[in-house]
Image (spheres, rainbow, N blue to C red):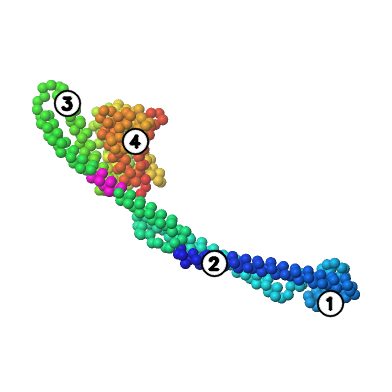
Amino acid sequence: MSGRKNLVILFGFVAAVSLISSAVTVMLISCYYSRLQFDLVNVICGEVLEQEPEMKHIVSAALKEYTGGNADGVAMGDVLSVLGYDISDFSDSSVTYDIMFAITGFLAGIVLFAITYTFRNNTEAKRIEELSDYLEQVNMGKAVVLSVSGEDLFSKLEDEIYKTVTFLYQTKDAAVQAKNDFAENLSNIAHQIKTPITAISLSLQTLSEMPMKKEYEKDRIEQIKKQLNRLIHLEESLLVLSRLDAGALMFQKEDVDVFTLLVLAADNLQELFADSGTFIDIPESGEMAVTADLNWTMEAVINVMKNCMEHNAGGTVHCSYGQNPLYTEILIWDEGDGFAKEDIPHLFKRFYRGKNADAGGNIRGSGIGIGLALSKEIIEHQNGTIRAKNLPNGGACFEIRLYKQ
């Protein structure tokens, strides 16, 4: 709202109030002078009739001729009232015009006030709508430079909104740059790890081909192999996370049967399940499909199943799934000891070391502390959520929800 519009609105309000005040004042003054006329004529007539009572017919006739009223009654005192006259009978046409003018001015003031009030509200509503449209464009990432519309009550708000939006854009750019830098650093670390891993693999292969004289030498080589496999998994996971952070990992969306997804994930862990003596139960609950990337979603489910298996050796890992109009839910749980209560909020953080972490940093079988974090990233990049909880009767449970697209 510009300064000119402010002046128009101010003038409108002042004019409306002035008209209303003038109209009320004219009406009050008119009534006052009518009363003065009535009292003056009343006193004069009273004095005349007091001195000359026989003149009452003459006075009455004169008043009747002046007002057009009737001359009934002959009592003294308030002579005019006794004779049937009141204040309005002595208000001439000019007074009537004054009253009409006052009423007209009053109504005009009311109308002008209503028009001015409506104009002001419409102008403010338009300014609010402009600011709302600007904020909507900001949310859609299409905001342009906010043009100054003039000095008004909304100018300071407009200025603060523009400053806030500019600051948020700068913060967003800095956050995106920091995320890209972090992703690049992860990628560089993964590639740097790859070189010594290759050298260790070659040396280990050479040692494996040499005849072992003592049993403990074989055990050490097996331990080296296990640690090497962990490093290889770490290197691969870091590369995947760096691609996720950089937005370079593309998911192929297709209809995937949930039961098939769970079975394929379990098949990839078949050897590990057999070695640990753990069973996996996947009951078929009918045909249900989700829109997701089969391979990457299977990778996320594998990490969750592995977590349950490693802390449930000799037990059973259970799976179930269901679907409603909003999402498809997959539950995977075990019969182990469950999570430490203080670890639950941090389970999906990268490299988190919990209360029950072993010397290698394992938290509930999370290996190098990156498997659950990777699962979370994969699920969330496909419009899903994953959370962990303890079951009332013991055991840990993972809840995966993939929402409709």
**Foreground residue, 117 or 33?**
33
Under tag 1, what secondary structure? helix
Report if residue 198 is visible in the image. yes
Which marked residue is nearer to the observer: mark 1 or mark 4?
A: 1
Question: x, y (%) of residue 49?
Answer: 87, 72
The magenta region covers 175-184
Tell me the number on the disc at residue 12.
2
Kindly give the residue lying farthest to the left in the view shown: 210
Tell me the number on the disc at residue 140.
none
Kindly give the residue lying farthest to the top in the view shown: 214
Whether 238 is drawn above or below 67: the answer is: above
> Which residue is rendered at x = 30% and y = 49% of the image?
174
Work out how far the residue at label 1 is from the one at label 3, CA to CA, in angstroms: 141 Å
Quarter assignment of residue 303: top left
Crowding near the residue tagged with mark 3, few <14, some 14–19, many ≥20 C-alpha atoms within 10 Å:
few
Tell me the number on the disc at residue 346.
4
Question: x, y (%) of residue 253?
Answer: 29, 48
N-term-proximal mark, 1 vs 3: 1
Whether 131 is drawn above or below 275: the answer is: below
Which residue is under mark 3? 220
Question: x, y (%) of residue 402?
Answer: 35, 44
Quarter assignment of residue 210: top left
N-term-proximal mark, 3 vs 4: 3
N-term-proximal mark, 2 vs 3: 2
Work out how far the residue at label 1 is from the one at label 2, CA to CA, in angstroms: 52 Å
Amino acid type, label 1: Ala
Work out how far the residue at label 2 is from the one at label 3, CA to CA, in angstroms: 95 Å
Tell me the number on the disc at residue 61.
1
Amino acid type, label 4: His
